[in-house]
Image: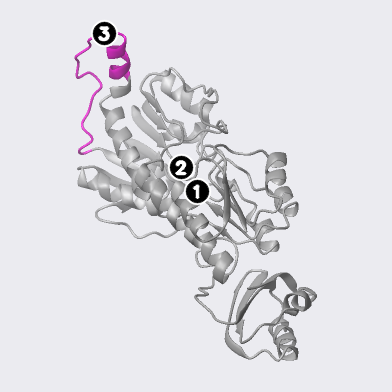
């Protein structure tokens, strides 16, 4: 089997897949749609980060692809429905870089409160401006967290340990940690927070959800952070509020348009605006996080190609498959009545003694993992002929 890993995925992933017998090709940057289609011919496993787009067109043109891994938190760069329809599970790393993102957020909160971006720039220009003007401790300040998932919740705990008061808003019902307080509305949070930080996912409905109206509702001289997704905020509106002085500072790690490779030029209206920290989408880019992500996602991909496991897949039914003897049938199918009866009928015709069988469903897709004693060379072809079959593999 061949694996293609893009966007500087950590070498730990290459090591794990190579030691398991896969032929691994690595490339440093992202690929466009046409380039990706060409590169995926004959490839069973794809690994990407946040820039490469695994579109429906790419999926349709890549019949050899068995599984895809997003070596990051988000999966909005993948056409998940199209992948599921082809029986391709998609995996991500929902927890591995949480601490790294939280630590960057804490660092930027302190830096903005002390106006360190301006002071640092002036020192490099030879200007000694020792002044407390505009500088504050974060102790006692109100941190407003929008999106109380893994990152937002951990940020809540660390911020509170530094003496901040934490409020949060989430569209889902989330348990408040420590002394954090849930707000009933976004408007309530914006009216109270001294610093607003976004930790939302990349779903289409979140595009530009934080714009002119929301910036205008923030407290005078409040600060703003976004380390989540580049398309969820209005950059031009933020610039206007920074230049007017209404917002005292901002830290941005994600942008609506980002270069595909390191070293490519970057342009943004946020450049050269005072007390603004710009970082190149490095929230999860620590050695510790990248090693853990590489190990975690590569492990999920390897588990699927070797045992058929789909645990923690974001788009197909989840099954913990485990080790097996004899023949294992992996049957992804349309979730319709009677499919298991027809599947077992084919197995019976092969005199296959079933030693293990499990089924899981997710929406329109069903997934059966069946272990059969002995070897059955023609089984895959006959199962592929069933009308309900989406994808079948016999290992």
**Residue 228 tag number:** 2
Residue 115 or residue 43, whichever sits in front: 43
In the picture shown, does residue 318 fall above or below 110?
below
State the image coordinates of residue 293 (x, y, percent, origin top left): 43, 51
User: Is the Cβ of the residue at disc 2 closer than 8 Å to that at disc 1?
Assistant: yes
Q: Quadrant of the N terminus?
A: bottom right
Give the mark nearer the N terminus: 3 vs 1.
3
**Could you give the CA–CA distance between mark 3 and mark 1, rounded to whole angstroms?**
41 Å
Give the mark nearer the N terminus: 2 vs 3.
3
Residue on which the image places disc 1: 201
**Is residue 121 a member of the stretch shown in magenta?**
yes
Report whether 312 appears left or right of 85.
left
Res. 124 image quadrant:
top left
Residue 26 or residue 293, whichever sits in front: 26
Residue bounds of the magenta highlight: 118-140
In the picture shown, does residue 349 fall above or below 63?
below
Asked whether residue 183 appears in the rendered view, the answer is no
In the picture shown, does residue 338 fall above or below 140?
below
Report whether 114 appears left or right of 171.
left
**Residue 127 tag number:** 3
Q: Secondary structure at mark 1?
A: loop
């Amino acid at each position: 089997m061949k694996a293609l890993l893009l966007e500087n995925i950590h070498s730990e992933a290459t090591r794990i897949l190579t030691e398991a017998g896969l032929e691994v090709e690595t490339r440093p940057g992202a690929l466009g749609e046409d380039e990706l289609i060409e590169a995926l011919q004959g490839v069973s496993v794809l690994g990407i980060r946040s820039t490469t787009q695994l579109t429906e067109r790419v999926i349709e043109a890549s019949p050899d692809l068995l599984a895809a891994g997003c070596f990051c938190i988000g999966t909005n760069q993948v056409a998940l429905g199209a992948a599921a329809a082809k029986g391709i599970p998609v995996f991500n790393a929902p927890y591995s870089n949480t601490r790294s993102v939280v630590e960057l957020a804490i660092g930027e909160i302190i830096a903005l409160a002390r106006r360190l971006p301006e002071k640092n720039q002036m020192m490099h220009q030879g200007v000694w401006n020792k002044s407390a003007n505009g500088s504050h401790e974060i102790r006692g300040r109100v941190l407003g967290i929008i999106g109380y998932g893994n990152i937002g919740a951990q940020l809540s705990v660390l911020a509170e340990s530094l003496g901040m008061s934490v409020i949060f808003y989430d569209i889902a019902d989330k348990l408040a940690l420590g002394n954090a307080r849930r707000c009933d509305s976004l408007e309530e949070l914006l009216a109270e927070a001294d610093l607003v930080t976004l930790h939302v996912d990349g779903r289409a409905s979140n595009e530009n959800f934080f714009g002119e109206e929301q910036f205008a509702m923030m407290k005078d001289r409040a600060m703003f952070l976004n380390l989540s997704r580049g398309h969820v905020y209005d950059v031009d509106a933020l610039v206007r509020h920074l230049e007017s002085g209404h917002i005292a500072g901002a830290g941005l790690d994600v942008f609506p348009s980002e270069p595909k490779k390191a070293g490519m030029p970057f342009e943004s209206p946020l450049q050269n605006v005072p007390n603004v920290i710009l970082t190149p989408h490095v929230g999860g880019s620590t050695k510790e996080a990248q090693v853990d992500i590489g190990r975690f996602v590569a492990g999920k991909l390897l588990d699927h190609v070797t045992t058929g496991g789909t645990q923690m897949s974001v788009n197909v039914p989840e099954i913990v498959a485990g080790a097996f003897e004899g023949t294992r049938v992996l049957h992804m199918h349309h979730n319709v009545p009677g499919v298991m009866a027809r599947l077992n009928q084919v197995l019976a015709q092969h005199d296959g003694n079933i030693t293990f069988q499990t089924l899981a469903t997710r929406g329109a897709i069903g997934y059966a993992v069946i272990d059969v004693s002995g070897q059955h060379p023609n089984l895959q072809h006959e199962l592929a002929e069933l009308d309900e079959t989406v994808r079948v593999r016999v290992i």
